Amino acid sequence: MAGREANKDVGAEPQRADGDGGEKNLTSCQRFGVCYAVGLALVLVVVTSAIALGVSTRGRVDPYFSVEISGMEGLDPLRSPVVFPESNLTLRVDNRRPIRQYCREKSTVTISYSQVDMAWGELPAFCVERRSASELSVPLSRPQVLLPRQLRDRMASDMHVGKLELGVEIEPSRPQDADRPCYLSCIIMSGHLDEPQLCKQFCV
């Protein structure tokens, strides 16, 4: 018996134990393969997140909006209390998005002077493809708004010095049904009525 046990131990490597009773290598990053895999996984997560964020941000780039009004030659505030002539508004949408189209629900267009509504129209729902531009024409209805003499005199004075400002507001017809209702606000100056004027967009 003693001889067989002695022979069994011949050639066996001595077991080396540390003070904790385990191998030190199990609690360190000296095992290069494991550390490399973990590091590579972290890099991939960061890169993927950055790409996803970039695509999402680029997809939300707002288009350029501009408006112009045609048929305003008959605007004469001193001739009649009903001063706004028959006219059309043209909305130009320049969609700069590289990866998605821009769509807008049916909207209401209102033209005002000194916070008094002068005319309005309906802009139908539309979509503009990515990296494309489109123009939409909106016939403006002329409401029977009677301006007081004082306001007409102010309008005539503003026109004379080239400082007449017409406000253009474009808002969703049913904002409660929109996922992200957006509003357009534009200013058209006299002397530039038939020239495109940039608009600002506000979304809530």
Image (tube, grey):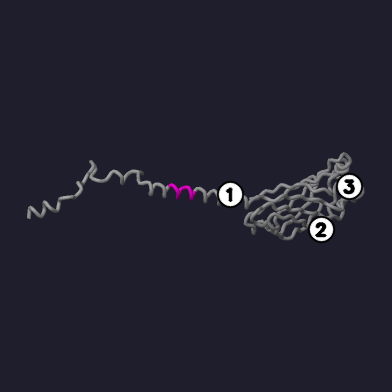
Q: Is 175 left or right of 112, judged from the image as shown?
A: left
Front-most of 101 and 79?
101
Residue of label 3:
77
Q: State the count of labels.
A: 3
- At label 2, the amino acid type is Pro
Front-most of 122 and 115?
122
Residue of label 1:
54
In the picture, the disc for residue 139 is: 2
Q: Earlier along the polypeptide chain: callout 3 or callout 1?
A: 1
Q: Residues within 10 Å of mark 2 (few under 14, many from 20)?
A: some
- At label 1, the amino acid type is Gly
Q: Which residues are magenta?
A: 39-45
- Image location of residue 23, percent across then percent down: 27, 45
Secondary structure, mark 2, is strand
Secondary structure, mark 1, is helix
Q: Per the image, is 142 magenta?
A: no
Q: Is 171 left or right of 13, judged from the image as shown?
A: right
Q: Per the image, is 43 magenta?
A: yes
How far apart are the alpha carbons under marks 3 and 1? Answer: 52 Å
Q: Earlier along the polypeptide chain: callout 3 or callout 2?
A: 3
- Image location of residue 182, percent across then percent down: 67, 52
How far apart are the alpha carbons under marks 1 and 2? Answer: 39 Å
Classify 75 as above or below 128: above
- At label 3, the amino acid type is Pro
In the picture, the disc for residue 37 is: none
How far apart are the alpha carbons under marks 3 and 2? Answer: 21 Å
What's the residue at 11%, 53% (across, down)? 5
Secondary structure, mark 3, is loop
- Image location of residue 62, percent across then percent down: 67, 50
Q: Are marks 3 and 2 in contact (CB under 8 Å)?
A: no
